[in-house]
Amino acid sequence: MHHHHPVSTSAIAVQSFRASTVSCPADPNSQMAPKPIDQSTYVPKQVDSTTANYTEVHHRQFIAESAREQERIAELTMKKRLQEAEQARLKRVTERNDALSKKTAKKAARRAKRKQAKGAANGQVSSAAKTSADPAEDSGAMTEQKTTDVDD
C-alpha cells in the first residue's frame, strides 16, 4: 500500500511508533516494538495516532493560549475604557473650569468697567457726565448684571 514512500517515512514511522509506545504503554501494539515494522500496516496507523496526539496537545495549547489572549484583550479593553472614562472626566472638568474662568473673566471685566466708570465720575466730570448722560442705559446695564449673577 505505502511501499512507494521514501526511506525517510520509515524513519518517521519508527519515531512515531516509539513516540506512541512512550505516550501510551498500555497500547496493545507496544509488545511488537522490537519486531521490524511492517510499513504497510504501521505507517498510517502510527503516524495517524501520533498526529492525533500531536494535534490534541496543540489544540490544548491553542485553547490555553486563546484563553490567555481573551484575558489579555479583556484587560486591555478595560484599561482602554477606564482611560476613555478618565479622559471624558478630565474633558468635562476642563470644560467646567473654562466656563467658570470665562464667567469669572466676564465678571472681572464688568467690575473693571464699573471701577473705570466710577473713576471717571470721580476724576473727570466731563466724561462722567457723558457716561451717565443716558440713565436708562445705565440702569439697563445694572439689571443685566444682576440677572447674570443669579444664573450661577
Image (spheres, helix red, strand yellow):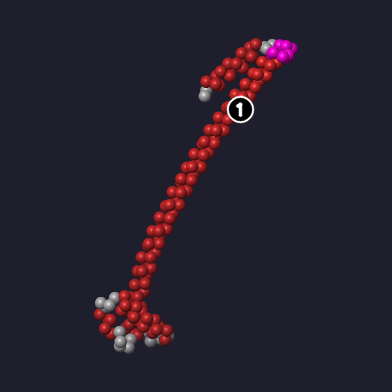
Picture coordinates of residue 13, whole percent (x, y):
37, 82
Residue 123 lies in quadrant: top right
Which amino acid type is shown beneath numbered disc 1? Ala
Tell me, yes or no, if residue 44 can be seen here: no
**Which quarter of the figure has residue 140?**
top right
Please, what secondary structure does the residue beneath circle 1 have? helix
Q: Residue 96: x, y in percent?
A: 53, 33
Residue 115 x, y percent position in the rendering: 65, 19
Direction from residue 89 to residue 41 in the image, left or right = left
In which quadrant of the rendered view does residue 33 lie?
bottom left
Say which of 16 and 44 sits in front: 16
Give the position of the N terminus as an image quadrant: bottom left
Left or right: 45, with 111 as reference point: left
Kindly identify the residue that appears in the image at 61 percent across and 13 percent down: 139
Near-viewer residue (52 or 91): 91
Q: Which residue is at 40% across, 55% downward?
A: 71
Q: Position of residue 134 (x, y in %)?
A: 67, 12
Residue at position x 25%, y 80% from top? 28
Q: Does 129 lie within the magenta span?
A: yes
Please name the residue that numbered disc 1 is placed on.
105
Say if 76 sits above or below 43 in the image.
Answer: above
Q: Which residues are magenta?
A: 121-131
Check residue 146 for magenta coloring: no
Q: What type of secondary structure mainly makes up the magenta span?
A: helix
Residue under the image location 46 percent in, 46 percent down: 81
Residue 130 in the image: above or below residue 71: above
Question: Label 1 crowding class (10 Å Cα cut-off): few <14, some 14-19, many 20+?
Answer: few
Q: Is residue 3 visible?
A: yes
